[in-house]
Every structure is written in C-alpha cells, then in structure tokens.
Image: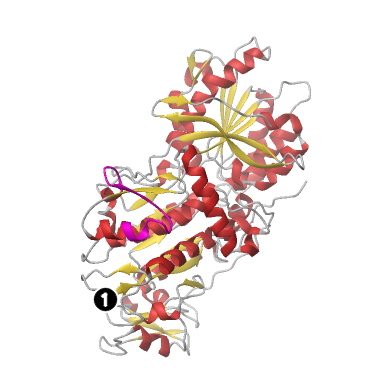
C-alpha cells in the first residue's frame, strides 16, 4: 500500500491535502518564508502595500527588489499597450482606477488565459482564479475547464458586449493563481492580494479546498468587496448569509448531503441490516474533523438522524451512537501529533464495532482514517456500511485501488454528488468530447467527466453573464453580486456553453433575466445563501467490466427532492 505522509509545517499543508484529494501521494516539503523586513523587501507592489501604512504609495523596484515611493503623477499610463511594452511584452494592464501599470503575472499567479490582442484592447475585463493546477491530472482539468470557458466565449462572440452601448467588444481575460504555493497559507494570501490589489479584479473563481476558501474569502475577497465563485463549496458554513451574498457556491452542500445520508440510513441501510440478520439495535459512529467542514457536517447529521426509532442523542444514551474526532489534521500547532490523534479515533471506532460509519473529513485524511477502518476491521465482525458525508470518496483515486482489492467492501461504501436530470447527460457527453478534443494530452491520463470539472467551466459563464448583466454600472464585486437574481426562473433557459452565448448576452443586455442551466445542473442560486439549489444523489463504486477494477463512484438513482427521497436505489458493484 502506498504511504501518505502529512507535512510537518502547517504553512505547507495545502499541497498535501489537494494532492491526496486528487489521487497522488506526496510528502509536504519543509517550507520557508522570507520576511519583508530583510534587505530583499519585495517581489511585487502588493507586498509593499501590505507592509503597513508607512509604505502607502510605494511600489516594488524590480532592480533592487525594494519598496520605493512613487509620486501620484509619476509613471501614469493611458493604454494597456504602454504597460505591456514597459514590461517587455509580459501581460499587463493600465489600471483604470489610478492609470498605473499592473503586470498580470506574479510568482504566485503565473498564468493568463487570453492572448496579446485581447489585452491590447483597453476595454478588456480581467477576472481572477485560484486553482489547484499542477497537482494531478484532475487538478489540471479544473484549470483546463477555465481555459476552455474563456476560449469558447472568445471563439463565439470575441468577448463581452460593451457596457457603453457601442459595438465594441470587451475581451474576457483570466489571471490564474496557484492555490497550493510553496509558502502555504502565506502564498495563498499573497496570490489573492495580487488579484485584488494589483489587478483590481471584480470577481474571482476558486479556490477548491474548503479551508483555503475560508481563508481567502475572509481575509482578502470579502473585505475588498470582490465576488467569489466557489466551484466546490460542500460546507454550508463556508459561505456567510448576507443581504447580497458575496460568495456563490456551485456544489451540492452539506445540508443536502447529510439529508441524503439520513434518508439512506432510514430507507435502505437499516432495513438491509435487518435482512442480513442483525437483531440487536443498530450502532452508528461518526468520525469527523475539528474544522468547519467536519463540525458542520456532524451538527447537521445529528440534528435529524434517526434509527432504532430514536434520535442520535437518545441512541448515544443507549450506547448505540458514537461521535469521535480526529482533530484537525492540518493544524500542527493545535494538533502537533495528528497521526496519533487519528489512530486513537480509529481504534475507538474499531472497538465500538458499529454497523454504519459516517465520515466527515477532508480528502487528505482518508488514508489516515478510512483506509485503516477498511483494512483492520475484525474478521469475526460483520462488515459495516460507510457513508461519506463530504462527497470526497468519489474524487479520491487511491480509494478505488483499495476497493479493487477488497471486493466485499465495494457494495458497502457510499458517497454523494449533485443530482443531474437524465436529459443533462447528452450535454455532458458532448462537452467531454469537446474537452478531450481541445486537450488530448490531458485526456490520455484520466477522464474529464467528473462533476468537479464541469463546475469550473460553469463558473466562467456565470462570471461572464454577471458582468454583462451589470450593464454600465461600475464593475465592482458588489454590483456583480447584485445581479444574482437575474439568473433564476422565470427567465428564459440558457445553457452554459457555446450554443446559447449570443442569446444570453442579448437577453441580459436588454435588462431581462435568464434561467442559467449548467453542466452540473440547473444553477438556481439561492439569493439568501449564495448556494446553488442542487439536490444530492447517493453514489457507489463503479466497476470497469473489462478490467474488474473500481474506476469511479457512480450515481445510484436515489436522490433528495425537498424533504423526500426519490428514485430507485441501484448499486450493483
């Protein structure tokens, strides 16, 4: 079995977590951070501005890498071309707020999706992205999905319609940053600051990891009034309710996944256990992480969990319910020995011998807690059912390898995804063909059919349509957030992708709304919460009939609809 090491520096955890989530083994390297109080003070203007009030009005001198004062009327620009020429051909813009040049790339933000001709257009709109690029094939798919969205809009309509009523086009350009930079949390904040303060983007797409979402939105994006579109935001605790939500989540959230899990236990697993010969009371354990992800899922699960005809609290009194924490695996300050804490939690669950085990942990913890529970289960004890409350089993490829080897467990693991109506599947198949044609080198290593990838593509169209719906108002995150209600019924149905771009722009330009339908489902965003109103569907391992290997988690046809469960449960691994 492969080994999955947890890094020793809390600042460096992000790369490990996402690498594990996307199916690769990695040991986090030691990380260092050079303080800007040293002789080498800066690498970008935003670093100078972050040093404190005394550095206001400074910029980073590239020759000396030190912060120098700039007079208000010095180095003013008129066009993006002036700035690109000044930067030696590197992508740059002339900021409209102060007529200063800003280079689009930085060490933390090395990619720009948009060509030179687009940037030479002074009406170009630059938006931001923070992605897990370079950590695995699936991580690279998320970046490619963004790139494809930008390219599709460019190919069909050359860009966004002008806000001033003219026939001019506003090219859409994406400045993309690394989510897991070598400086860990510090690098993520520097990347977000570059997007917000150097480039003044009105909207950002990403990050992907829940803890990074919380950090970036609370420390950078929300305080600076930048709209954040989060393709993967499973925890409802990550997005704060606001009069006008400044963060929009495009994934099914834990309110729905825990509801689906509760119904799965009541409607399927408890009857199945009785059919298997269990006559004593059913025992359930939840193993969760001490962070916003795990704590929220536990609270939601316990609020309505019912089995043996009793609530979770009543079953706990009867010693038929156990909640055990693995700590916060990534917090090496508050939890300096995470492996020990996880091992203790696993032992408690093994000793409890539950019939059903609920998991509320981030992907990086799966090798530490799920793998031992699968491989160390007592041979003389009935195998339990495992239910993933966070919808991560289906994204974790090493788990597929383990299930390939442990055949009896294939029919006893369940995860979640957002429920897709059957009519959406042909669109997804067409899009996968389009994707693999554009990125054949990626298609050779894995499949771009994961819902996670679709959501990043959908996010580009949501950002573009918000900008168009904004009309001639100042292009700010607050104004873009105010367009939210224009993407829900009763507007005309518009699908993300090339087919409906021109019609969507026409409707929005005329002040009408649209009912946005993405590859991941109908993107009806709740104006009160910022979450897309997806229903949750149970998934189980999918077997490749030719190789006999577990290759994915597939929808079972069993999904939530309001407070009910619909469909016929199908899982035959």
Secondary structure of the residue carrying tag 1 is loop
Camera-nearest residue between 227 and 536:
536
Q: Quadrant of residue 391?
A: top right
- Describe the colour scheme in one phrase: secondary structure
Total numbered circles: 1
How crowded is the residue under tag 1: few (<14 C-alpha within 10 Å), some, or many (20+)? few
Residue 506 at x, y percent in the picture = 27, 60
Q: Is residue 2 magenta?
A: no
Please give the residue where the numbered disc 1 appears in the rendered image: 97
Q: Residue at x 28, y 77 (%)?
A: 96
Q: Quadrant of residue 81?
A: bottom left
Q: Is residue 496 magenta?
A: yes
Compared across the picture, whether 42 is left or right of 288 comes to left
Camera-nearest residue between 363 and 407:
407
Compared across the picture, whether 9 is left or right of 193 comes to right
User: Is residue 189 among what the camera can see?
Assistant: no
Compared across the picture, whether 158 is left or right of 397 comes to left
Residue 138 at x, y percent in the picture = 60, 55
Residue 276 at x, y percent in the picture = 68, 15
User: Is residue 94 among what the camera can see?
Assistant: yes
Q: Which residues are magenta?
A: 488-503
Q: Quadrant of the C terminus?
A: top right
Camera-nearest residue between 458 and 414:
458
Residue 152 at x, y percent in the picture = 45, 64
Q: Quadrant of residue 496?
A: bottom left
């Amino acid at each position: 079995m492969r080994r999955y090491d947890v890094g020793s520096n809390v600042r460096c955890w992000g790369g490990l977590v996402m690498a594990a989530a996307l199916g690769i083994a990695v040991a986090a390297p030691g990380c260092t951070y050079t303080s800007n109080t040293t002789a080498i003070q800066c690498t970008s203007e935003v670093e100078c501005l972050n040093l404190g009030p005394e550095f206001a009005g400074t910029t980073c001198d590239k020759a000396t890498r030190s912060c120098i004062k700039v007079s208000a009327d010095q180095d003013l620009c008129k066009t993006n071309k002036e700035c690109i020429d000044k930067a030696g051909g590197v992508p740059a813009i002339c900021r409209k707020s102060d007529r200063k040049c800003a280079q689009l790339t930085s060490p933390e933000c090395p990619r720009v999706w948009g060509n030179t001709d687009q940037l030479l257009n002074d009406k170009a709109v630059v938006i931001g992205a923070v992605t897990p690029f370079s950590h695995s094939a699936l991580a690279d798919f998320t970046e490619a999905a963004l790139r494809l969205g930008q390219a599709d809009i460019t190919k069909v309509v050359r860009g966004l319609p002008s806000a001033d009523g003219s026939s001019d086009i506003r090219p859409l350009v994406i400045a993309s940053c690394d989510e897991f930079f070598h400086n860990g949390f510090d690098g993520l904040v520097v990347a977000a600051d570059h997007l917000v303060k150097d480039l003044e983007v009105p909207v950002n797409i990403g990050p992907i990891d829940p803890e990074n979402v919380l950090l970036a939105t609370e420390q950078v994006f929300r305080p600076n009034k930048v709209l954040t579109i989060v393709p993967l935001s499973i925890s409802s605790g990550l997005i704060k309710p606001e009069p006008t939500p400044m963060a929009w989540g495009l994934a099914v959230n834990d309110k729905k996944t825990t509801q689906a899990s509760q119904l799965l236990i009541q409607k399927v697993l408890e009857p199945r256990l009785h059919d298997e010969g269990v006559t004593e009371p059913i025992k359930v354990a939840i193993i969760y992480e001490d962070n916003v992800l795990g704590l929220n899922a536990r609270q939601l699960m316990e609020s309505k969990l019912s089995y043996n005809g009793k609530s979770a609290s009543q079953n706990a009194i009867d010693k038929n319910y156990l909640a055990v924490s693995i700590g916060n695996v990534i917090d090496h300050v508050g939890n300096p020995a995470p492996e020990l804490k996880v091992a203790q939690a696993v032992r408690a669950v093994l000793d409890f011998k539950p019939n059903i085990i609920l998991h509320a942990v981030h992907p990086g913890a799966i090798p530490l807690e799920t793998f031992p529970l699968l491989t160390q289960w007592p041979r003389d004890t009935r195998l339990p059912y495992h239910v993933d409350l966070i919808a991560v089993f289906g994204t974790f490829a090493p788990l597929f390898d383990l299930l390939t080897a442990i055949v009896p467990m294939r029919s006893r693991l369940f995860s979640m995804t957002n429920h897709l109506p059957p009519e959406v599947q042909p669109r997804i198949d067409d899009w996968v063909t389009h994707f693999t044609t554009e990125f054949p080198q990626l298609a050779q290593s894995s499949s771009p059919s994961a819902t996670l990838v679709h959501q990043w593509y959908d996010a580009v169209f949501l950002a573009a349509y918000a900008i168009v719906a904004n009309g001639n108002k100042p292009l700010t995150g607050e104004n873009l957030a105010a367009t939210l209600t224009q993407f829900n019924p009763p507007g005309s149905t518009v699908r993300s992708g090339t087919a409906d771009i021109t019609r969507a722009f026409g409707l929005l330009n005329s002040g009408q709304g649209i009912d946005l339908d993405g590859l991941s489902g109908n993107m009806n965003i709740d104006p009160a919460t910022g979450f897309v109103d997806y229903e949750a569907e149970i998934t189980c391992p999918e077997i490749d009939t030719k190789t006999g290997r577990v290759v994915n988690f597939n929808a079972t046809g069993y999904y939530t609809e309001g407070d009910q469960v619909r469909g016929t449960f199908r899982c035959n691994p």
